């Protein structure tokens, strides 16, 4: 555990030029975040950086491989590649790699946000129809309950003389 803490402290120093970087413990490793967006992960004192179609070839050209974990007897390959060893010595060498990973994370986030917006737009139409239907049903129920309430109020508002009159007529026959 002490080695983990030392490595994490070292990463803070190494990534200092990036600015607002936070490293959070998660799933037996750590996530590396810049302003809330994860662009790296740490597992077994190894830094992995976010890749996509644009920057993955740079990592592969250096012989870096992906982060792979095993779950339910399956190997899961993630979109994070090991940071090149030569950039682990100086912040000036790490910064371009970290910025490239951050850009990949931003592209993925933008894609995810656009996808969610499209999904919300589609379900929004269905939700609007559902809201209208629900509103009509509620309006119908309110009308019914209002009538019932009015009837009850009306029966309670009958003047005492009417009740007495009805009793007198029945009794008078």
Image: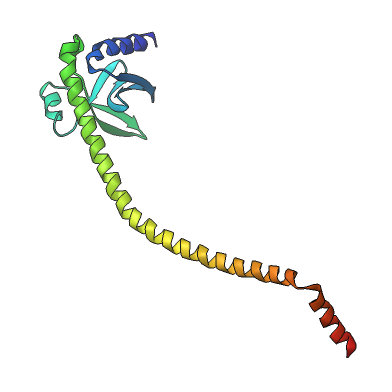
In the image: residue 157, left or right of residue 13? right
- Quadrant in the picture for residue 82: top left
Residue 73 in the image: state x and y as whole percent.
34, 34
The residue at the point 21 percent across, 34 percent down is 107
Could you tell me how many numbered marks the image carries?
Answer: 0
Residue 35 in the image: state x and y as whole percent.
30, 25
Residue, far left: 61
The answer to which of 161 and 151 lies nearer the viewer is 161
The correct choice, above or below, for 90 with respect to 61 in the image is above
The answer to which of 11 and 145 lies nearer the viewer is 145
In the image: residue 156, left or right of residue 135? right
The residue at the point 18 percent across, 9 percent down is 90
The correct choice, above or below, for 95 with respect to 121 in the image is above
The residue at the point 13 percent across, 26 percent down is 60
Residue 172 in the image: state x and y as whole percent.
89, 88
The answer to which of 7 and 159 lies nearer the viewer is 159
Q: Is residue 65 visible?
A: no
The answer to which of 163 and 126 lies nearer the viewer is 163
The correct choice, above or below, for 123 with respect to 95 in the image is below
- Quadrant in the picture for residue 41: top left
């Amino acid at each position: 555990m002490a080695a983990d803490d030392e490595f994490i402290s070292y990463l803070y120093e190494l990534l200092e030029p990036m600015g607002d970087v936070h490293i959070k413990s998660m799933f037996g490793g750590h996530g590396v975040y810049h302003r809330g967006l994860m662009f790296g992960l740490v597992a077994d004192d190894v830094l992995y950086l976010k890749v996509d179609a644009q920057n993955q070839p740079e990592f592969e050209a250096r012989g870096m491989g992906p982060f792979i974990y095993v779950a339910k007897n399956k190997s899961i390959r993630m979109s994070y590649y090991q940071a090149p060893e030569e950039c682990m010595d100086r912040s000036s060498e790490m910064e371009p790699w970290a910025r490239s990973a951050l850009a990949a994370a931003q592209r993925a986030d933008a894609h995810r946000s656009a996808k969610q917006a499209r999904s919300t737009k589609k379900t929004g139409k269905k939700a609007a129809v559902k809201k209208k239907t629900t509103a009509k049903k509620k309006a119908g129920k309110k009308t019914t309950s209002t009538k019932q309430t009015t009837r009850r109020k009306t029966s309670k508002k009958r003047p005492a003389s009417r009740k007495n009159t009805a009793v007198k007529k029945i009794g008078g026959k």
